[in-house]
Amino acid sequence: MSNVRQIAQQSGVSITTVSRVLNNHPRVSPEVRQRVLAATNAAGYAPNVGRKTACNIAYAFEGETTLDSPFDAAILAGIARGLDESGFDLMVLNVSRARLPYETYSQMFQRKGICGALLRSANPSRPVVETITAEGFPAVVIGDRLEGGRASFLDCDSRGPSREAIEHLINLGHRRIAIAMHVVDDYDHTERLAGYLEALSRHGIAADDNLILRAPASRAGGVQVVRRLLNLTDCPTAIYLTDPFAAVGAMNECRRIGARVPEDLSIIGFDDGDIRFGIHPEMTCVCQDAAALGAEAFSMLCGLIQNAALSGNPTGLPLPSHPVVRKSLRAWLEIHGTTGPVPTVPALAAAGSKRLSVGLASSVVRPSTPSNPSELST
Amino acid sequence: MSNVRQIAQQSGVSITTVSRVLNNHPRVSPEVRQRVLAATNAAGYAPNVGRKTACNIAYAFEGETTLDSPFDAAILAGIARGLDESGFDLMVLNVSRARLPYETYSQMFQRKGICGALLRSANPSRPVVETITAEGFPAVVIGDRLEGGRASFLDCDSRGPSREAIEHLINLGHRRIAIAMHVVDDYDHTERLAGYLEALSRHGIAADDNLILRAPASRAGGVQVVRRLLNLTDCPTAIYLTDPFAAVGAMNECRRIGARVPEDLSIIGFDDGDIRFGIHPEMTCVCQDAAALGAEAFSMLCGLIQNAALSGNPTGLPLPSHPVVRKSLRAWLEIHGTTGPVPTVPALAAAGSKRLSVGLASSVVRPSTPSNPSELST
DNA sequence: CCCACTCCATGAAACTGTTTCATCGATGAT
DNA sequence: ATCATCGATGAAACAGTTTCATGGAGTGGG
């Protein structure tokens, strides 16, 4: 185990200077700082004083917080339930903000007394997540499959259930089925698209690019999905929305324009919690148990931490070969009241378009895509 | 500033022993431990080494976590948004679990590098919250008014808007108005009851104990509220449910038994987020902005921490007179589609009761209150 | 050009808290 | 009675931080 005195000797400075560098004090010349940092990283230095306080778990994300989404909230709650028995404390951390310029992510975690991290991954933050896991710091990635490196992860397979959802629609006679995904292109949404495409191809239905939409994961996004689809000359008879809020928004908009669900249009949503029971009709949807995801990820992380402690690497510094744990929970399809047989008469397009134009005239909300009158009347 | 050596001298032991006591090591005799602790508390000791790491904010609660509720989730999100600029990190802490037997809450916070706490208060945890604030540790209580001591708090006044909500119903002609509150009797729900009673008394309507219900803050709770109220001989024409989920459950149950909202029954709910827009008809409700509550509480706490730092009390130890900040946000009434004129014919009781018995026969869910057939037929 | 003066980088030493190892006495088994 | 063991304790070594002193580079006035 290296200490400040060794680092000092190796970089030819005093321990004072080493301490200053490590604590980011201003009064150090750039060259000396550089030299000390090099020695520090080479030696894999970790502070020994205050080491005992390293009993925190981080729920780490990068960039904007999405803590208020039911998904993140439920994950947090799942983690929190595990905490009580474990003796760990939970820290919520924006890793990109918390890291000092010079340090590795592992060093940052150590500095904050964190001995393991749950990494919430979305596509934009993937590079960061990959860096952290590559450093060998005990971490479990939630909601992404980092097949490449040596990352541990827990994801929820929504591809199979998404396929089943679409096949459910196909069995009901639907052929023109739309899918609406989040504009942020994360792993989960991509998987749901894959399930959708799989179902279509299994039943010999050609995918239509016009029926593959992206919209914000919000009620407003769902509203837009319905409006845009109703503008199509060949309107779909069913929509799969891969986000809870978007699904609710779509239901609202259907009601507003007088399209009956499921008589005129079938809707399959997605649910992290129990939104599906709060709306009417209860929503057919692909479900995942986000709280279970949090609890499971936490227990995986505890395993990793224990393992690191046993292998004499309590500081979480990079190891040539650290253990990898990978696991998948499964999402599932729940059939409720928003899916039904394909309409015999194509009532939706006509009714929808007509009422859409009426509705818009009296509505405060304007569609974000400027509607072309000629399209509306088709 | 005291240190271990002073504590050691005062309690007549070595610094080793003091360190052992402070770190809760087992090999200390009870008497010595007692003596050292006394000296420690008397001296207001705070560790100096590792002091710089005290840059965390705690979101502290006691007992069961409610992190997955939209209210707590939104508060957290509000806090998280403030964090980025502040340079603090957020710790989620179950104070009753995290505290070691001997230490004060302030010491516990310090041990964990926490320089300020946001305390989520509910009635069962009030004693703990009061203790913490009495210690003078920089803390802001969210959602409770601790008028007594010197506690800083931020609450959201829902009493006025609750009164307005009931008056809105009275103006629509309603006279028999029920209120359903959470079984856990926290400050907010009590306030909403007060607003309800105020409105009744202002309009010379006598409060009826039969119309004041308690039910769990869940969809199932809301279902029960409707069932129990329909059992009454003199059925209400409007209900105010002080919890979002309960309101949604009540709406569901109304739909199931064929009671139309608002034609047969007016419903006013409560909303922390935007549930009101996700259901149909959009729900008339008293709203509060939980994210704003989190953000505001955080900014208040930052003020307290800065103040403590300026007054040379960076450790957050008890001060004879620490500053107190108190603030209220306001909830507000939003009128949407679930409230309407009082029904001219008392259709609900008859229709509801009839369908209730039919519905129950075919339903898996049983009411928790055993229904008396004679009551049903009235 | 020289001489204070200032400012900055740096190190020695003082200081804080933790951990290791040795000691001492009580207790219990033989 | 003797020896082994174990628990409580302290001295000293150790790790890291902070204070204060130092020396040199730059600067401005004479």
Image (cartoon, coloured by chain):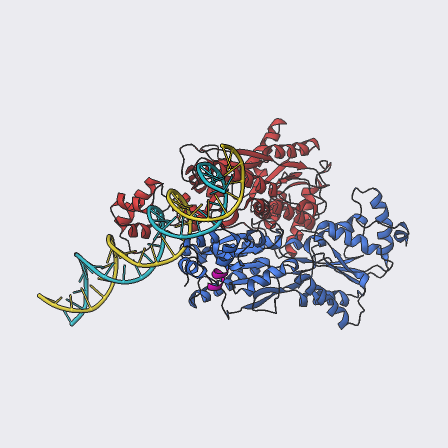
Chain colours: A blue, B red, C cyan, D yellow
Left or right position of A52 against B328: left
The answer to whether residue A43 is magenta is yes
Residue B294, image x, y percentages: 57, 42
Q: Quadrant of residue A225?
A: bottom right
Whether residue A377 is situated above or below residue A188 in the rendered picture: above
Whether residue B160 is situated above or below residue A63 in the rendered picture: above
Bounds of the magenta span?
A: A38-45
Residue A201, image x, y percentages: 77, 71
Whether residue B54 is visible here, answered yes or no, is yes
The residue lying toward the viewer, choosing from B12 and B62, is B12
Whether residue A25 is visible here, answered yes or no, is no
- Helix, strand or loop: magenta stretch: helix
Residue A66, image x, y percentages: 62, 52
Q: Quadrant of residue A159?
A: bottom right
The residue lying toward the viewer, choosing from B177 and A69, is A69
Quarter the C terminus of chain A occupies: bottom right
The answer to whether residue B162 is magenta is no
Q: Count the numbered circles shown.
A: 0
Residue A238, image x, y percentages: 78, 60
Quarter the N terminus of chain A occupies: bottom left
The residue lying toward the viewer, choosing from A292 and A12, is A12
